[in-house]
């Protein structure tokens, strides 16, 4: 187990400078970063927002596979879609039911993106952003002027406008209250799948861009630059993630 934790530490520290964790912690979004080359494809970084949303501490999250947050109501077909996207090393966006530490289910917009090594074009990590979905019922009952088509003027200005941090955190507190209402509702698993609004989709895309720009910036000084698009496939040595997941398992069995 210690050797696994060592690999996880190394996975992050070898590619990003010391300050990367701090810069990622400053971002308000819920996100996780995984390493497909380590056995079990574990989470190597979890944001503060993700810990708050899931109710787990960082120690409880690091080293786990993302499926840890699934439960009986999670749609298997959606999970297969995620698995396929990982195998094909591409972006995917799905509505997904997950469970908090206290067992309450919640819907989220899950957006996944590979992170490539600029030098050889391999996938070094995967990045996933998890945006909680406010159900239509609570959008209607809330004070917010949410709308599917993007005329959600008040909230959008707060989130995307030139907002100051304290204004943002006030609005996020309100959003937390709405989400708490959502999780209070019984039988969430049996409800129709929650559809993400345009606002939530934009929020996920923005979050991915923000995290990727931090990763790019903080990988520059280690000399192991990452990028969001496969830049080059140097030589013929390109091995895709699913093969590397298997190789990771073999490597791990020698270490243990
Ligand atoms: C970066 C990353 C983060 C993930 N986060 C979650 C998550 O928060 N919740 C979830 O249900 N699945 C998450 N997953 C998906 C699972 O880890 C897994 O890939 C999925 O369940 C399909 O594989 P399986 O069929 O082997 O379970 C994440 C995957 C990656 C690559």
Image (cartoon, rainbow, N blue to C red):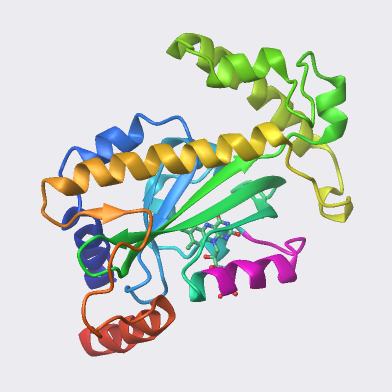
Most prominent secondary structure in the magenta stretch?
helix
The residue positioned 82% from the left and 52% from the top of the image is: 193
Pick the front one: 93 or 249: 93
Asked if the magenta segment contains residue 67, the reply would be: no
Asked if the magenta segment contains residue 80, the reply would be: yes
Indicate the quadrant where residue 19 lies.
Answer: top left
The total number of labels drawn is 0
Q: Is residue 232 in sight in this rendering?
A: yes
Query: Is residue 178 placed above or below 55 in the rendered structure?
Result: above
Quarter containing ligand 1? bottom right
Pick the front one: 31 or 178: 31
Q: Quadrant of the N terminus?
A: bottom left
The residue positioned 83% from the left and 48% from the top of the image is: 188
Residue 251: % across, % down: 26, 85
Residue 231: % across, % down: 30, 62
Q: Is residue 51 in sight in this rendering?
A: no
Query: Is residue 196 placed above or below 180 in the rendered structure?
Result: below
The residue positioned 53% from the left and 59% from the top of the image is: 91
Query: Is residue 242 placed above or below 179 in the rendered structure?
Result: below
Pick the front one: 38 or 147: 147
Q: On the picture, is 216 further left or further right than 208?
A: left
The residue positioned 23% from the left and 67% from the top of the image is: 7
Which region of the structure is painted magenta?
A: 70-85
Q: Quadrant of the C terminus?
A: bottom left
Q: On the picture, is 158 further left or further right than 232?
A: right
Indicate the quadrant where residue 37 lies.
Answer: bottom left
Residue 23: % across, % down: 28, 33
Residue 237: % across, % down: 24, 84
């Amino acid at each position: 187990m210690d050797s696994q934790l060592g690999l996880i530490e190394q996975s992050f520290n070898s590619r990003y400078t010391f300050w990367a964790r701090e810069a990622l912690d400053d971002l308000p979004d819920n996100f996780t970063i995984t390493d497909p080359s380590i056995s079990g494809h574990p989470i190597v970084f979890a944001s503060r927002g993700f810990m708050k949303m899931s109710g787990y501490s960082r120690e409880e999250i690091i080293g786990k596979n993302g499926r840890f947050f699934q439960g009986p109501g999670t749609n298997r077909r959606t999970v297969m879609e995620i698995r396929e996207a990982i195998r094909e090393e591409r972006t995917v966006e799905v509505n997904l039911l997950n469970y908090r530490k206290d067992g309450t289910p919640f819907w989220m917009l899950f957006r996944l993106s590979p992170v490539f090594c600029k030098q050889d074009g391999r996938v070094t990590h995967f990045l996933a952003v998890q945006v909680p979905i406010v159900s239509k019922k609570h959008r209607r009952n809330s004070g917010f002027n949410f709308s599917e088509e993007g005329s959600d003027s008040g909230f959008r200005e707060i989130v995307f406008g030139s907002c100051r941090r304290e204004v943002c955190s006030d609005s996020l507190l309100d959003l937390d209250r709405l989400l708490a209402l959502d999780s209070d509702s019984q039988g969430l698993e049996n409800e129709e799948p929650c559809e993400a609004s345009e606002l939530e989709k934009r929020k996920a895309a923005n979050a991915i861009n923000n995290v990727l720009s931090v990763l790019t910036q903080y990988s520059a000084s280690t000399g192991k630059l990452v990028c969001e698009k496969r830049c080059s496939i140097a030589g013929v040595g390109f091995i895709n993630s699913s093969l590397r997941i298997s190789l990771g398992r073999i490597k791990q069995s020698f270490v243990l």
